[in-house]
Amino acid sequence: MLAVATAHGDAASMQALEELCRRYWKPVFAVVRSRASSDGQAEEQTQAFFVHLLEKSTLRRADRARGKFRTFLLTVLWRFLRDERKRASAEKRGGDTQECNIEDVEDELVADDPALAETLDREWALAVMERALASVRREVIAVRGEAVWRLLRGFLPGSAEMPAMSDTAQVLGITEAGARTEIHRLRTRCREALRRELMSTVSSPEELEDEIAYLGRAFRSASAAMS
């Protein structure tokens, strides 16, 4: 997706750019919000960050050989927030403001602030899972209806409480063994939806498997943080 987004500036590139921004808006906002004084300030800074990415053609500097796109994005964001703080400080002192220039972003490390990486990964995992579940939800509702989806949703990640198997079977009008089969199929569809979500972000099957495993760890961390 990044390759398409930074290709030639045609319609396909613009669509890919918009999709990238849409996918990473919530994770980036969560990082910014952790440092901002209010939701309003966080929204303004998040918007300014994505405008910066587009105007400065920063995405063209991302190199998959040097690591994950999230690491690259976080590095750019870390520098952006740092420079914004410097700008605000200069304005308070009455000094000259400097244009926010980000050069050689891959060479900057954010190891001194690991909480930013944890926040981005956690929100990224939640966003990926949300999109996958939304895809499965549409499929189930189209065939079985909203009520069945609300029931079966309890057996998928992120649910607060899992329904009793006997109650599930009764509502579905099938045996408990049949209900277990339904749930197994649903979870399989969910995994397939996750793979589709991640497929556009990797360049090989090996990377896909690594990313799925990483997503699992990040999602478990997100679930633990919310519990």
Image: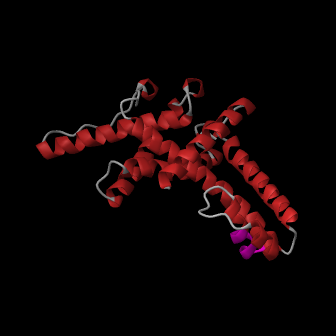
- For the N terminus, give its image quadrant: top right
Taking the image as shown, residue 25 lies to the left or right of residue 16, namely left
The residue at 40%/29% (across/down) is: 111
Instruction: Report whether 53 appears left or right of 41.
Output: right
> Residue 34 appears at what percent x and percent y?
36, 49
Frontmost residue, 170 versus 188: 170
The residue nearer to you, when weighing 4 against 175, is 175
Residue 153 picture location, percent across and down? 69, 64
Q: Tell me the quarter of the picture where residue 206 sits.
A: top right
The answer, for residue 21, to whether it is visible in the render is no
* Residue 150 lies within the magenta run: yes
Above or below 82: residue 147: below
Start and end of the magenta stretch? Answer: 145-151
Figure quadrant of residue 37: bottom left
**Is residue 84 on the magenta stretch?**
no
Q: Residue at x 46, y 27 (%)?
A: 106
* Observer-nearest of 97 and 88: 88
Left or right of 101? Residue 55 is right
What residue is shown at x 84% (from left), y 66% (from top)?
A: 176
Q: In the displayed structure, would residue 120 be above or below residue 153?
A: above
Q: Is residue 147 left or right of residue 5?
A: right
Q: Nearer the viewer, residue 218 or 68?
A: 218
Where in the figure is residue 155, as x and y percent of width and height?
70, 60
Residue 64 visible, this orientation: yes
Q: Main secondary structure of the magenta part?
A: helix
Q: How is the model colour-coded?
A: secondary structure
Q: Is residue 174 above or below residue 5?
A: below
